Amino acid sequence: MSFADEAIRFNSELEYTGLPLPAGIRIMNPFRESEQSLAVSSAFYEKYYNDNGQRHIIWGINPGRFGGGLTGIPFTDPKRLVSECGIAYEGKMAHEPSSVFIYEMIHAFGGIEFFYKNFYINSPCPLGFTSSKAIGKEVNYNYYDSPQLQKAVQGFMAESVRKILSMRIYKNVCFCLGTGKNEFHLQKLNDEFGFFERIIALEHPRFIVQYKSKAKQFYIDKYVDAFRSVLQSGVE
């Protein structure tokens, strides 16, 4: 099986197996909720991962409503899917600021094909969540936003990471997007199961675009330097 085959199989078999969720929290599984999500994400992996090479993994948090929650591809919203990846998408051309940052960084790194030839992005919690406000509006919710949710999903997260690492992933260094709670929980998971020798944490794209937009180029350079370092050092 190619890397693409493994990624597509993981997505197509993905379902929530954790404990019951707290009241008011809904799980997002784009591969169960939309036939298009599985189709466009499969086209993406067939385009960029149709080989037997290994990749370094980059961990996000969990899919958001306007990016991976629609396309099934981490940090790739419908606009970037069409304009950057050349893959057709039918429906609302949603915009996710984190996706904009990631693709600007990818171009600075060396381009889309080169980036995805070396890196694979997923999340320790590969399914997203939403919370319903009193007025009925759904908003993004992270797996660590409440102790109750974090406790409910911790077994599912460990199982998901183990399945992802059965793919062609280098296991001595990984990257974590998020230098706060995501890093804390990923490190805690790693301390328990020993998935990786080292975790390199970088500021999350959402934090950068929301609070550090004037320093965006600094963070793009920081990402690029970190990712290039594992290639130049021959880390495997």
Image (tube, rainbow, N blue to C red):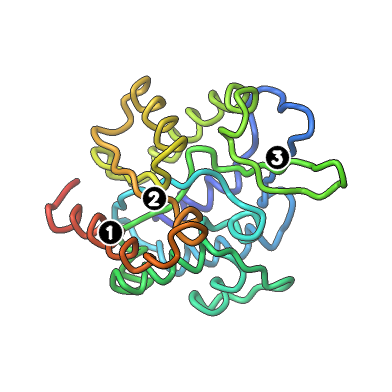
Residue 74 location in percent, x, y? 52, 55
Horizontal relation, residue 8 to residue 200: left or right: right
Residue position for label 2: 203
Foreground tag (2 vs 3): 2
Q: Residue at the far left: name it.
A: 233
Residue position for label 1: 222
Tell me: residue 126, above or below residue 97: above
Which amino acid type corresponds to the residue marked 2 in the rendered image? Glu
- Is 136 or 214 nearer to us in this picture? 214
Which amino acid type corresponds to the residue marked 1 in the rendered image? Lys
Q: Secondary structure at mark 3?
A: strand
| Label 2 to label 3: alpha-carbon separation | 25 Å
Q: Secondary structure at mark 1?
A: helix
Horizontal relation, residue 85 to residue 78: left or right: left
Residue 89, image quadrant: bottom right
| Label 2 to label 1: alpha-carbon separation | 9 Å
Q: Which mark is residue 27?
A: 3
Residue 26 location in percent, x, y? 74, 39
The crowd level at tag 2 (other Cα within 10 Å; few <14, some 14-19, many 20+) is some
Residue 222 location in percent, x, y? 28, 59
Mark nearer the N terminus (3 vs 1): 3
Tell me: residue 164, above or below residue 2: above
The crowd level at tag 1 (other Cα within 10 Å; few <14, some 14-19, many 20+) is some
Tell me: residue 38, above or below residue 10: below
Which amino acid type corresponds to the residue marked 3 in the rendered image? Ile
Horizontal relation, residue 66 to residue 48: left or right: right
| Circles 2 and 1 in contact, beta carbons < 8 Å | yes
Residue 135 location in percent, x, y? 87, 47
The crowd level at tag 3 (other Cα within 10 Å; few <14, some 14-19, many 20+) is some
